[in-house]
Amino acid sequence: MIDNAFELVTQTMERQYPDHVAFRYVAADGETVVEKTYAQYVQDIRRVVTYLRGAIPDIKGKRVALLSKNCYEYGANAFGIILAGGVVVTLNQKKTWPELEYEIGLVEPSLILNDGIDYGCRDQLVAAYGPILRPMDSFQDSEPAMDIPNTRGHDDLMVLMFTSGTTGRSKAVMLSERNFFTTVGEQVVFGDAMLDYKHTHMPENKNDVLSNFCILPLFHLGTFICLFVWPCKGWALNLSSDLRDFYRDVRLMHSDAMAVAPMLMESIYKDVKRGRRERLNGLWNPCGSSAMFDGKMLAELAREGMMITQVYGMTETCGDGIINYAQDEKHIRSAGKPDDHCEYKIAEDGELCIRGGCVMLGYYKDPAATAEVVDADGWLHTGDLARADEEGYYYITGRKKNLIILDSGENVSPEELESLLAKCPAVKECVVKEKGKKICAVIYCEEAKQEEVREYITATNRTLPLYQRMSAVEFSTEPLPRTGTGKLLRK
Amino acid sequence: MERSEIVSQILAILEDVAEISPEDVTEDSVLMDDLDLSSMEILTVVADLEETFGLRIPEKELRNFVTISDLADYLAAHAG
């Protein structure tokens, strides 16, 4: 098993699968599908190395930022930076200027490779960083570098990636080659599971060279890691850069798998339910990111012949964690069963902790924040609450910071109760919180439906242990207050 | 194209994408709140409108579309 970027490029991509398609994307005409083989890809990676050597003297350890939509050049630049000895920084091009300015200021890049599109703050970007802004295809006229030594240490900083920052300012997660290839190991097993499923459920389909549709952004680890995983088997990434183009691109590029956010899973579900499955052009493995999908929806998709998988991970674990392969209704909503490639434990307060090669080096320039999540024994505290069932399947039940701690010392996850309330058709929105030492459900529903909801809560309470029961109910005839990013306010 | 025609096109696409009856929609309807559209549904509506009107809406304009009226105004000004 390959464990470093150098061999992944110079052995696996260049020697083992040179003629396989590495990337597909739809050209600017909106119709033509462009294909790049691994041989072409590696030549471009080598061009990037030459270009960067010229542009950044003594590049080792210097940061090069990628500020771009999904495109073929994203991959070439990422590996070019890594092979040249630099550090890849991925930035979210759709952030507001104050956020971007903060992130760029923190990492102090030597160059920013950029797609040139105005997402709303192009003027500020050019004014502040014009001299180090370069187009994504700057390498095009460079000669491929043939003399690339592998000087990267397994634990050297390789990639800096920002956490989504749902709490406070975003932090830059430092990831090493070891982090990436620990996750790659887990994900290659995932690839084997896909082939097993395909051989069992679609024996007539003889093509074992699979394709993955990448529409979630490459600046996000869940997609970025695909740049490392899919080449291991010589498989292809079908790139799409805009959710608007989802149906067009998936029609033009058959894809077997796709990482999906909840809204995409719902779209796929609606297509299947409304008899419009042909729009998905044979897609059969939508992979969720354990964002607590509705179990019934997942089970229905599985019955319709889709392989439903979920990956539990976070940027701080380089996307690694647990993968759920279960297709049965009982376990399909779970986060999966841990294997032994990392260590897992559920702490006394219910928090899921992970230890192993996937755990980040730390937060960039922020040892205090690092110490808050990685303890002295190397356990990463995920901040997620989990429970395991008798068969060893893990379930993510909520976020630790939302936990209600009762006088009795018992802990209640509001998300778990909210997911029960959401099953009542009359409930439009709900938040569970502590109020006057009681567990209180705040419900937004029509006034005429309040009694129905009250009865539903009573019936639900009967199924819950005493300490989890919702003993207070408040009704609102208006939508509940939300934060600036659209999440329900809990206070 | 007349503005009323543009609005009818938007309503037809909304009905197709999100199964919302045109009778339930006014020009002031807020896409995410009143019509309860997911961001994916909004983008699918935009993609269908782009195809219908033969144009591509720049990325930075997208965040300005809050109501049906915003969409109609943009299309009235830019569709040939």
Image (spheres, rainbow, N blue to C red):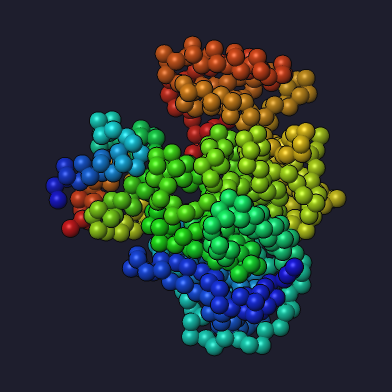
Residue A399 visible (yes or no): no
Q: Quadrant of the N terminus of chain A?
A: bottom right
Q: Would you say A434 lies left or right of A352 here?
A: left
Most foreground residue, A129 or B58 = B58
Q: Quadrant of the C terminus of chain A?
A: top right
Most foreground residue, A458 or B33 = A458
- From the top left corner, tell me how far across and down residue A136 is, in percent: 48, 73
Q: Would you say A363 lies left or right of A22 here?
A: right
Residue name at image x 39 percent, y 39 percent: A274
- From the top left corner, tell me how far across and down residue A177 is, in percent: 72, 66
Residue name at image x 35 percent, y 34 percent: B35
Residue name at image x 68 percent, y 68 percent: A158
- From the top left corner, tell me how far across and down residue A468 is, in percent: 69, 21
Residue name at image x 49 percent, y 11 percent: A451
Q: Residue furthest right?
A: A377
Q: Would you say A7 lies left or right of B5 here?
A: right
Q: Would you say A366 lies left or right of A141 here?
A: right
Residue A437 drawn above or below residue A172: above
Residue A436 drawn above or below residue A254: above
Residue A256 visible (yes or no): yes
Instruction: Indicate the quadrant where residue B17 lies.
Output: top left
- From the top left corner, tell me how far across and down residue A222 is, in percent: 60, 55
Residue A166 drawn above or below residue A70: above
